[in-house]
Amino acid sequence: MSQIMKLGFLAMLIVFGSEVLSLAAEDDGSKIAIIAPKNGEIVGETFALKYDLAKGSKAAHGHVYLDGQRQKGFEGTFRGVSKGRHEIKVVAATHEHGELAASDSVTVEVQ
């Protein structure tokens, strides 16, 4: 590989590497803890999610995810969840819905 190609490749790594670093979620000092259900808990197809959000400098609310899918407008209860293993994740978010570094997750078994 020629020196010019090596330098070009290195320049691309630097540019794209800095872009990836800027996408990292901001830590504003917020903390999230899922209170219920507990990790590994067996639940029915309808169950409540309870979490505690200690707001940092920018957090306003939490975004709730079920198996990686954001639950827009989530009001605290999952309904009609299929049987099997599921991951629940809560992420701190700003008023503008930008997600912050604080998050917590649990896995439940629906029976």
Image: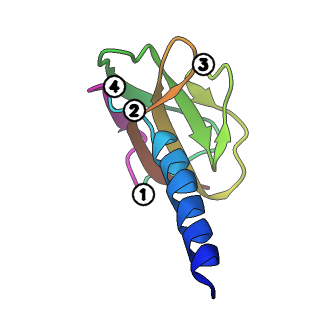
**Is residue 1 found inside the magenta-colored segment of the image?**
no
Is 36 positioned to the left or the right of 63 in the image? left
Callout 2: helix, strand or loop? loop
Residue displayed at 52% across by 49% down: 20
State the residue position of label 1. Answer: 40
| Mark 1 or 4, nearer chain start | 1
Identified by mark 4, the residue type is Asp
Percent coordinates x, y for residue 82 in the rendering: 72, 51
> What numbered label is drawn on residue 29?
none
Which of label 1 and label 4 is nearer to you? 4
- The residue that mark 3 highlights is 75
Mark 1 lies on a secondary structure that is loop
Left or right side of 11 for 60? left
Q: Residues within 10 Å of mark 3 (few under 14, many from 20)?
A: few
Q: Residue at x 63, y 23 (%)?
A: 74
Specify which label sits upstream in the sequence, 4 or 3. 4
Residue 109 visible in the snapshot: no
Q: Position of residue 53 (x, y in %)?
A: 34, 23
Give the Cα distance between marks 2 and 4. Answer: 19 Å
Pick the residue in front: 71 or 19.
Answer: 19
Inspect the image, locate mark 1, and give the three-letter code of the amino acid beneath it. Answer: Gly
> Which residue is painted at 42% across and 57% down in the image?
40
Task: Tell me the amino acid under the disc marked 3.
Answer: Glu
Quadrant for the C terminus in the image: bottom right
Kind of element beneath mark 3: loop
Is the residue under label 1 in contact with that under label 3 (CB below 8 Å)?
no
**Which residue is found at the position 49% from the left and 31% from the top?**
49
* Above/below status of 19 relative to 62: below
Disc number at residue 26? 2
In the rendered structure, which segment of residues is drawn in magenta?
Answer: 28-40
Q: Answer few, some or many: residues within 10 Å of disc 4's Cα (few below 14, many 20 plus, some between 14 and 19).
A: few
Distance Cα–Cα, label 3 vs label 1: 22 Å
